[in-house]
Image (spheres, rainbow, N blue to C red):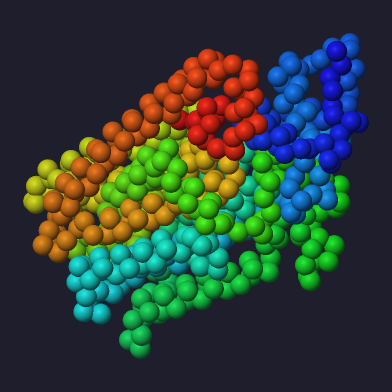
Amino acid sequence: MSRRTGSDDFTENSASKSDRTLFDSGLFPTFSSDKARELSDPSLEAKGGQSVLSTEEETAEWRVRNHRPSDTYEGLHRWDPKATWAPEEERRIRRRIDLRIMTMLCVITFALQLDRGTISNALSDNLLSDLGLTTADYNNGMTIFYCSFLFAELPSQLIEGGTIPDSIVYASLFYTNGELPVRLSFYWVTQTLTQIVSAFIAYAILRLGRDGSWPGWRWLFLIEGLLTLSLGIIMWFYMPASPTQTRSFWSKHGWFSEREEVIMVNRILRDDPAKGDLSNREGVTLAHLQAAALDYLLWPIYLAGLLVFVAYKQTGAYLTLVLRSFGFSTLNTNLLTVPGLVFYLFNMVWLAIVARRTKQAAWTSQIATVWIIPLLIALIALPSSASYWIRYALIELIQSQPYVHPILIGLVSANSGTVQTRTVSAALYNMSVQAGSIIGSNIYQPSDEPLYRKGNAALLAITVFTGFLLIFISYLFPWLNRRRARQWAQSSEQEKLDILLGQRASNKRIDFRFTA
């Protein structure tokens, strides 16, 4: 039996609604870009007249190639189930995307992190004393800030709060699912590098306040705010809407040729055909928001995002205040925040590698809690007479916590079930992380100064609970998969067909398998 490509007998009308439902069900696998390109090679037809795929793979391959995108999909005019291309062509295009798109996304997150991290550097320049504020007032101010940032996640429009989920969805328009995690790791690496660089930028700007006309922290807010605004305006005109919409008033011919656009569109759709079901101009409806918010299977991950970073963010927010209380100068205070960020950067990279190789997201995330628990215990037990260098070292090690944010948001994306749910669930997860910052900003209280033993005890309790929560997640999804596999095996052929053709695609269907 020769392998059927579907290119000869396929028409636009043959992509019926039942075909879409059957494919989107998750029963048929999607392929990596290399696999999709291999399947698109006509030369594979002449292999002794034998099929190179099993029956299930052959059916899946046909649907990968012939799953027609939505009429509103912006790249529909470049969709071609017959298209083929050489590996070198794809590599060349991918390098250009890295340079033109991913680099600029990193610039955007640089501006985001620089802007929202200004307050921490300003604290080293006597911000609170100049304004007559206490640490309680600081907590209230940070709560207001995080609430504003949280409520800006949805809707994600021109407001800075939606930058991260929007960037993830935007990058998915250009990269396959296999390519995206590596690129997102650079995205979060940039955030950490920004924190390191901002310490030196802050030192230079704060020196402007030495003439006494204006406090240095005022200059810091003004200059870094203007820098963020300027980058935002530039990106508004620079960033294209999609791979096929790169033409602008300053680039009339666009970034890519027609053939390159065909390759870009078809490699993305063959990797994940569901990406063609929505237009990039299609907004999130109230129904999508409700479905994602009520998806109780994702709630444990949201809760983990709420709690896992509380200790890291609370100790980090107070680090400059603690260092100033030790008697360090503004320069030394900012420089002493750098070592923890460097180790943090290293830990984020190796943890992402471990998660990718073990394919155990929840268990890998557990490393973050195991890392912090003994450090918090040491902070609580440390006598008042202990050297401030020991206390500094413990706080810096907490700031070196392996960052599991990319791992957990990837877990949310993989377990969302549909593109519509995934778009909203990414924002909801990020909102839970911001809500965790609100919790953290109110744990250290003035009555607990300067060692914050009660606050650290609360952070320890939260971290221990988070550890048990991650253990629960690591067992929950495999258990659901085994249960659904038994249900599917016990179903008759007619029952399976009814599920595939009669139920909407979602993570509630028994043919959907979770990632843990």
Q: Residue at x 35, y 34 (%)?
A: 470
Q: Residue at x 69, y 54 (%)?
A: 279
- In the image, taking residue 53 as reference, residue 172 lies left or right, namely left
Q: Residue at x 72, y 39 (%)?
A: 17
Q: Relative to 59, does residue 367 appear above or below in the rendering? A: below
Where residue 67 sits, quadrant-wise, is: top right
Percent x, y for residue 97? 70, 50
Which residue sits furthest bottom? 213
Of residues 506 and 280, the one nearer the viewer is: 506
- In the image, taking residue 470 as reference, residue 274 lies left or right, namely right
Percent x, y for residue 263? 80, 43
Task: Locate the N terminus by quadrant.
Answer: top right
Of residues 98 and 174, the one nearer the viewer is: 174
Residue 315 visible in the snapshot = yes
Task: Locate the C terminus by quadrant.
Answer: top left
Report how many numbered discs are placed on residues in the image: 0
Q: Residue at x 23, y 60 (%)?
A: 442
- In the image, taking residue 327 as reference, residue 287 lies left or right, namely right
Q: Relative to 294, does residue 350 appear above or below in the rendering? A: above
Q: Relative to 231, does residue 179 appear above or below in the rendering? A: above
- In the image, taking residue 364 as reference, residue 443 lies left or right, namely left
Of residues 155 and 410, the one nearer the viewer is: 155
Where residue 69 sits, quadrant-wise, is: top right
Percent x, y for residue 413? 52, 41
Residue 96 visible in the snapshot = no
Where residue 181 sits, quadrant-wise, is: top right
Q: Relative to 285, does residue 46 appear above or below in the rendering? A: above
